Image: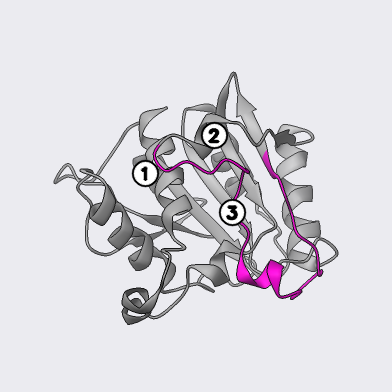
Amino acid sequence: MRIVSPTGKFVFATVEYASGDWESAPALPGNLIDSLVRYTTIEAEPAGVSVRLDSAEVFNYPFLWLTGHLPVRFSDAERQNLKRYVERGGFIMVDDHNHDITGIFHQTATAEIERLFGKMKRLPNDHEIYRCFFEFKGGPPHTQHELNGWGDDLLHPYLDAVLVGDRIGLLYSSKDYSSEWNFHPETKQHMQQDITKFGVNLIVYALTR
């Protein structure tokens, strides 16, 4: 699955699902799109889109982002599409916007994922996704919410994944990149370090593997 927009450009797609608050990080797509075009030669549409998980449209996008704070209870159609999407070669990032492994998003989202794919695998911190563009020698970068003790007051040193062969089809994060990357666009010019660089790796991996 390497489908892009009719103009040939990458489109950032956020997943709409019937339960929960799928739109909880509205500034995130624009910030990652900005970084993608800033650091790479990948052409991207300037605005992201949202796509219903139960629609055939999900198969038009090689990269999907799913997040939220509330319970995740997929419909039968959403489950069927998610399974087919991953198995057909798509890449979906699921990020817990609560940063809380005892919280309702984590408990319900992981239950839905493992109902479809079985237990997720812990992704080793030397996986190629941490060096496919920028290099992250220690694995997934920590977020300020982790470092400040917000949520479950834990640092999560690993991400979990659903693998299709040796390819990541679904990547799961308890780190709350949704909060980390959901900032006002003008904020970026005042940052000493660009905290969105790992998002670039996610997209590059999805488009090239």
Dot 3 alpha-carbon crowd within 10 angstroms: few under 14, some 14 to 19, many 20 or more:
some
Q: How is the image coloured?
A: one colour
User: Which mark's residue is nearer the viewer, 3 or 1?
Assistant: 3
User: Could you tell me if the residues under marks 3 and 1 are in contact, i.e. CB atoms within 8 Å?
Assistant: no
What amino acid type should be assigned to the residue bearing mark 3?
Pro
Residue 25 vs residue 83: left or right?
left
- Label 3 element class: loop
Instruction: Give the quarter of the figure containing the C terminus.
Output: top left
State whether residue 55 appears in this view. no
Q: Residue furthest front?
A: 192
User: Could you tell me if the residues under marks 2 and 1 are in contact, i.e. CB atoms within 8 Å?
Assistant: no
The earlier-in-sequence mark between 2 and 1 is 1
Instruction: Give the quarter of the figure containing the N terminus.
Output: top left
What amino acid type should be assigned to the residue bearing mark 2?
Val
What residue do we see at 55% from left, 49% from top?
93
- Label 2 element class: helix
Dot 2 alpha-carbon crowd within 10 angstroms: few under 14, some 14 to 19, many 20 or more:
many
What residue do we see at 55% from left, 34% from top?
169
* Label drawn at residue 86: 2
* Label drawn at residue 141: 3
Residue 23 lies, in percent from the top left, at 50, 71
Label 2 and label 1: CA atoms lie apart by 11 Å
Q: Is residue 5 above or below residue 122?
A: below
Label 2 and label 3: CA atoms lie apart by 24 Å
State whether residue 161 appears in this view. yes
* Label drawn at residue 70: none
Q: Quadrant of residue 125?
A: top right
What residue do we see at 30% from left, 36% from top?
3
Please give the range of residues in magenta: 133-160
* Label drawn at residue 61: 1
